[in-house]
């Protein structure tokens, strides 16, 4: 529920709904345009699906730019408008578009998607004393878009074609910009406080001028043990889940011989897992012990790998175990993402938050293509058994790394000398 102090921000959840719906809509349409209309090769499809890993390298510059003057609302509006323009460019050039042009446009689209996400998370942190509930609401909206978007995109493509469907994507981003602009979102006058502090104990985060440095976010992650743990778990989740997800569709056809309807069922169940994770975050978790909460749901990787392993061993329960596999992955993803984001919004200096979020974006997005490629190679070499067992080993590696204090183990002498120089 949005508090009375933040009712002027009621347009943000609606804007998030249209933004996520447009993203999920395009997530289906763009690959189909490449595969069917442009007859893309497997290599070209791989490049198209990996452009996000290239765009995310610019994330620290985006975070630093918006942290400097806190123009988060303007950043969200510009990002939405830019995405609408780029999708409109695809519509206008559809008759003579090629893969090179499409990849270039998608590079820009993914860049502005990252910009929107960075501005949104920083805006929530800058305007909400307790962003936990608001993050849960946004996660519920994302879940609804994940469930509705792909089906609506398929229906639109079959009835109206590519250009009209992309027109809906343009409209969704324009509506997102409108609902951000219309309520005239303004920064709240209160300060963001850590859990357990009173408002008197808190200071405006912008008073800490020393935190604004070129590599301040990297040093902050190294020196703050909890932030480092969240960072390791975020990368571990992104990498391990992508290893597992990379074999879901191919194994559904080759190993289990599932029909299109049977393949779609675990995906829908996964959306239910995301909704359940949002409800758990919203109603059953008060926002404390976020790191323990994150580590607990990180075990969903372990359980998902076990489900995938036995799905190949017990043929009579393969579809049920695949549903459990997707449910666990999406349940854990939603809970871990929300708890990590809430912790950063509540505990990180607001002048540094955009850059910290940028490093999280880099770590999680760059690990996706590497995880996908590793999963595919392991499947070709040893099937589902090798993929699931390797994922279990990687799970324990990342979980163990989350208990490391990097400052004490590796960087204490270097960081102490850096502080003396400053």
Image (cartoon, rainbow, N blue to C red):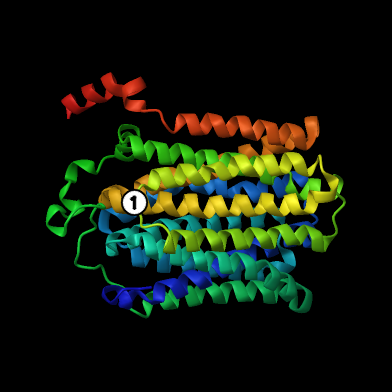
The crowd level at tag 1 (other Cα within 10 Å; few <14, some 14-19, many 20+) is: few
- Above or below: residue 178 compared with residue 208: below
Q: Please give left or right for residue 365 compared with residue 37 in the image.
A: left
Find numbered disc 1 in the image and state the secondary structure of the residue it sits on: loop
Q: Residue at x 68, y 49 (%)?
A: 325
Question: Quarter of the image containing the C terminus?
Answer: top left
Q: Position of residue 128 (x, y in %)?
A: 29, 64
Q: Position of residue 33 (x, y in %)?
A: 73, 62
Nearest the viewer among 147 and 395 is 395
Q: Position of residue 402 (x, y in %)?
A: 44, 33
- Above or below: residue 329 compared with residue 231: below
Nearest the viewer among 45 and 333 is 333
Residue 363 seen in this snapshot: no
Q: Quadrant of residue 383?
A: top right
Residue 275 seen in this snapshot: yes
Q: Give the residue number, with chain letter if any, for mark 1.
A: 288
Residue furthest to the left: 200
Question: Quarter of the image containing the N terminus?
Answer: bottom left
Q: Residue at x 40, y 76 (%)?
A: 11
Q: Position of residue 411 (x, y in %)?
A: 32, 23
Q: Residue at x 23, y 26 (%)?
A: 418
Q: Quadrant of residue 409?
A: top left
Q: Quadrant of residue 198?
A: bottom left
Q: Residue at x 48, y 55 (%)?
A: 114
Q: Please give left or right for residue 65 compared with residue 335 in the image.
A: left
């Amino acid at each position: 529920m949005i508090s009375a102090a933040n009712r002027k921000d009621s347009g943000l959840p609606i804007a998030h709904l249209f933004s996520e719906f447009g993203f999920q809509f395009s997530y289906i349409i763009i690959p189909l345009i490449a595969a069917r209309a442009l007859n893309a090769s497997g290599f070209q499809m791989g490049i198209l699906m990996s452009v996000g890993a290239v765009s995310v390298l610019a994330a620290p510059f985006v975070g630093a730019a918006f942290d400097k003057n806190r123009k988060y609302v303007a950043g969200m509006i510009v990002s939405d408008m830019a995405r609408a323009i780029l999708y409109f460019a695809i519509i206008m050039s559809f008759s003579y578009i090629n893969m090179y042009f499409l990849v270039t446009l998608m590079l820009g689209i993914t860049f502005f998607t990252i910009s929107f996400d960075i501005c949104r998370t920083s805006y929530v942190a800058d305007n909400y004393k307790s962003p936990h509930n608001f993050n849960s609401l946004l996660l519920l909206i994302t879940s609804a878009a994940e469930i509705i978007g792909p089906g609506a995109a398929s229906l639109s493509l079959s009835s109206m074609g590519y250009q009209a469907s992309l027109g809906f994507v343009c409209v969704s981003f324009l509506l997102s910009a409108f609902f951000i602009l219309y309520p005239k979102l303004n920064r709240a006058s209160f300060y963001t406080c850590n859990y357990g502090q009173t408002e008197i104990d808190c200071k405006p985060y912008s008073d800490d001028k020393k935190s604004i440095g070129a590599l301040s976010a990297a040093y902050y992650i190294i020196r703050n043990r909890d932030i480092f743990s969240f960072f390791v778990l975020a990368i571990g989740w992104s990498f391990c889940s992508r290893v597992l997800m990379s074999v879901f569709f191919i194994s559904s056809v080759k190993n289990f011989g599932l029909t299109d309807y049977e393949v779609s069922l675990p995906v829908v169940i996964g959306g239910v897992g995301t909704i359940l994770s949002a409800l758990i975050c919203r109603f059953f978790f008060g926002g404390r012990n976020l790191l323990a909460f994150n580590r607990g749901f990180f075990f969903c990787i372990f359980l998902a790998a076990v489900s995938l392993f036995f799905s190949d061993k017990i043929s009579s329960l393969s579809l049920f175990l695949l549903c459990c596999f997707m449910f666990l992955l999406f349940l854990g993803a939603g809970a871990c993402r929300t708890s990590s984001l809430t912790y950063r919004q509540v505990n990180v200096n607001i002048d540094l938050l955009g850059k910290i979020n940028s490093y999280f974006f880099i770590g999680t997005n760059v690990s996706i293509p590497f995880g996908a490629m590793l999963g595919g190679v392991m499947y070709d070499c040893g099937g589902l058994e090798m993929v699931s067992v390797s994922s279990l080993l990687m799970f324990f590696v990342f979980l163990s790394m989350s208990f490391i204090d990097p400052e004490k183990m590796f960087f204490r002498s270097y960081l102490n000398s850096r502080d003396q120089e400053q």
